[in-house]
Image (tube, rainbow, N blue to C red):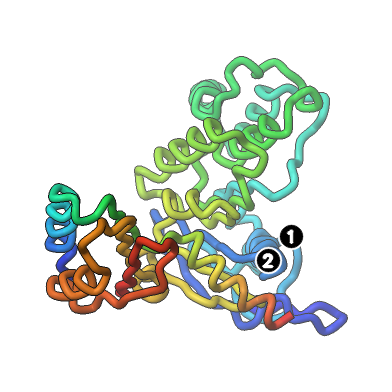
Amino acid sequence: MNFSGVFQMLEEMKATKQIKDFSIYTTTLEQIFIKLAKLQRKHE
Amino acid sequence: MQKIYPNGFKALDDLTFGVERGQIFCLLGPNGAGKTTAFEILTSKIPKTSGTVKLEGKELSRELYDVFNETGICPQSNTLWESLTVEEHLRIYGHIKGLSQNEADEAIEYLLEAIGLVEYRDRPAENLSGGNKRKLCVGISMIGAPKLMFMDEPSTGMDPLARNKLWNLIKNVMKGKRGTMVLTTHYMQEAELVGNKLGMLINGRFAIMGTLGELKKKFGEYTIAVHEIENGFSSLQIEILIQSVLSRAKRHMAPEEKGIVFKVFF
C-alpha cells in the first residue's frame, strides 16, 4: 500500500493550505476487542 | 479442553492452543468469556470435563508434581499470608523452588527492585496497598525463574508506573527464551506490548488467535482523515487525488462538516 505517497501528497496540500490538517491511523487491538466482544453479548 | 458445569453451562468449548517455549500467549476476552476457567484448568485448580493439557510435554493430570515444580502461578486473587513481610514471602517461595540461601538472596534483591517493592520489603502483607499486594504476587510467581508462568490479570490494580515496571520485568524474564508464559489481561496495551501470540475468547471459544499483525490483518483497517478542506477545494478533488495514489482507499462518512474520511482495509 502506497502510504508514503499519501503522506507526501497530504503534506504538500497542507503546505499549500488546500487542507488544514490530516491524520492517518490504524485499528488498535482495543477496537478489535470491542468489535468481537459485541458478538458475546449477542449470544447471551 | 472442554468445561461443562453441572447446570449444563459450557464455559469452554473445544479450546485448543499451544504455546512455544520462549513465547508469551495472551488470553483475552470480555468478562465471562472463559479466560479464568481456562486459566484454572491449566493451573489445576479446577478439573476439565474432557480434553488433554500437556505442559512441557507432560500430561497435567498424571504428572502434576513434576510439572508444578517448575511452574510459577499468579492467580487473580492475591494469595498472601497477612502477617508475613514482603521479603519473607519471597524467601519462603524461593526455598520451595529449591533455591540456595545465596540464590534466594540474589533473586529477592532482583525482584524487589524490578517490581518496585524495595522500600516495602519489611512490611507485612496486611499493610500493603492493593497494587503492592499484586506486585508481590507477581514476584512470588517469578522467583526461581520457573519454566512455565501463568499470570491471571497480573497488573490489575497497579498504577501506570507499576504496570510499566511489570512489563519490563516480564520482558527481562523472557529474554533468555527459557520460559513460557500464559497471561490473561484486560489491558490491550499490555497484550500488545508483551504478547507474542494473542487469543481472544468469546463464549468459551477462540474467536481469533494469532500474532498482533495477524489479528490486525484480519480485523484491522487504516483510517485517513483530512480534517478541514479549505475554501476553493472540494472533497471530490481530495477523493480523486487520494485514490490516484491509493486505489483501495474508500470514502467513509465524514465526522465533521469540512472533513473527509477514508478507510483502507488490509
Residue B237 in view, yes or no: yes
Counting from the top left corner in percent of width and height, residue B4 is at: 76, 80
For the C terminus of chain B, give its image quadrant.
Answer: bottom left
Residue B96 in view, yes or no: no
Badge number at residue B96: none
Badge number at residue B41: 2
Residue toward you, B192 or B240:
B240
Identify whether B49 is placed above or below B26: below
Q: Residues within 10 Å of mark 1 (few under 14, many from 20)?
A: few
Counting from the top left corner in percent of width and height, residue B253 is at: 41, 73
Q: Residue lying farthest right?
A: B7
Counting from the top left corner in percent of width and height, residue B236 is at: 24, 74
For the N terminus of chain B, give its image quadrant.
Answer: bottom right
Residue at horizontal 76 percent and vertical 36 percent from the top: B80
Q: In this rendering, would B242 be left or right of B9? A: left
Residue at horizontal 25 percent and vertical 56 percent from the top: B230
* Chain ID at mark 2: B
Residue toward you, B217 or B146:
B217
Residue type, numbered disc 2: Ile
Tell me how many marks there are.
2
Counting from the top left corner in percent of width and height, residue B47 is at: 74, 70
Q: To which residue does mark 1 refer? A: B45
* Chain ID at mark 1: B
